[in-house]
Amino acid sequence: MPAPARLSMYRQQIVMRPMQMPVLILMLACLLSLSSATAQAQKLSIYTEDWPPMNFKTKTGIDGMAVDIVRALQALTGSRENIQLVPWARGYKAVLEDESVMLFSLGRSPEREKLMHMLGPIAISKTAVYSRKGEAARLKALDSDIYKLPVGAYRGSIFADAAKKKGFINLAQADSPLNSSKMLFAHRFDMWVEGSLAVNSILQESGRTAADVEEVMVLDSLELYLAFSLKTPATTITLWENALRQMKKDGSFQKIHQKWLPGEAPPLEVVRVEGGH
């Protein structure tokens, strides 16, 4: 190659390299920004309560159907935050007031849809009224007068809300699901309102079985969700939504559901409820 041609090519290389640098810097900046946004989106305070078999405390930590689901979602999203088991009132207050909070398992209702974002459902239960064994027939015979009798639920729960909506006027609220069941057998009230998925586990914890109660009536069907505070970034919820869709598509969600709730049909749809409207 003649010397002038080599000199011309060398000059072109000198000119091109500086022009390429801004492009490389821009690409690097975009990658760093995306990585930072993903890391930021994954930062959550995660709360649950003692409500077996969905979520409950063990001698070595926390277990339950919803806990298994959340941990599987964390593995997919890269979330490493610890799940904190707290009293329901504390977790519910945090999801209403704080930034980047996730609370589970939470029953979906029209009132709650305005107060938080929701993702699910992860299970479907029913809200039912139970009596001590042998008393259901007497209570049903009261017709509308049944709504005047004392009924119990745990404080701040969707079950207490359901009882009020259906017309029960004498509501006693305990500080936990376990204590509400104990109060039923202590004759503190005639009926107990609880989610059907949890009744057996709660009774076992108190030394009783499902044979010790009778179903008086069903108040409604209850879908259980993951709840996010309104101040949670949309990118965070999208990460979790995509992960939940993946689990329901590949069958891993159904496997966990069957392990804990054999015989119950797993909800296969994925619904994202935008709160604040």
Image (cartoon, rainbow, N blue to C red):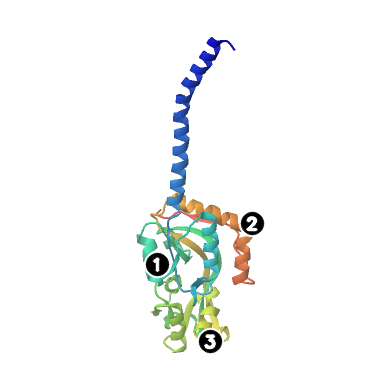
Dot 3 amino acid type: Arg
Neighbours of disc 1 within 10 Å: few (<14), some (14-19), many (20+): many
Mark 3 lies on a secondary structure that is loop
Disc 1 target residue: 91
What is the distance, in whole Å, between disc 3 and disc 1 at their CAs?
28 Å
Q: Nearer the viewer, residue 121 or 73?
A: 73
Q: Residue furthest front?
A: 3
Q: Nearer the viewer, residue 10 or 62?
A: 10
Disc 2 target residue: 250
Dot 1 amino acid type: Gly
Q: Position of residue 83 (x, y in %)?
A: 46, 66
Q: Residue at x 55, y 64 (%)?
A: 69
Pointer 3 with pointer 1, Cβ within 8 A: no
Position of residue 39 relative to residue 54, above or below, is: above
Location of residue 48 by image quarter: bottom left
Location of residue 3 by image quarter: top right
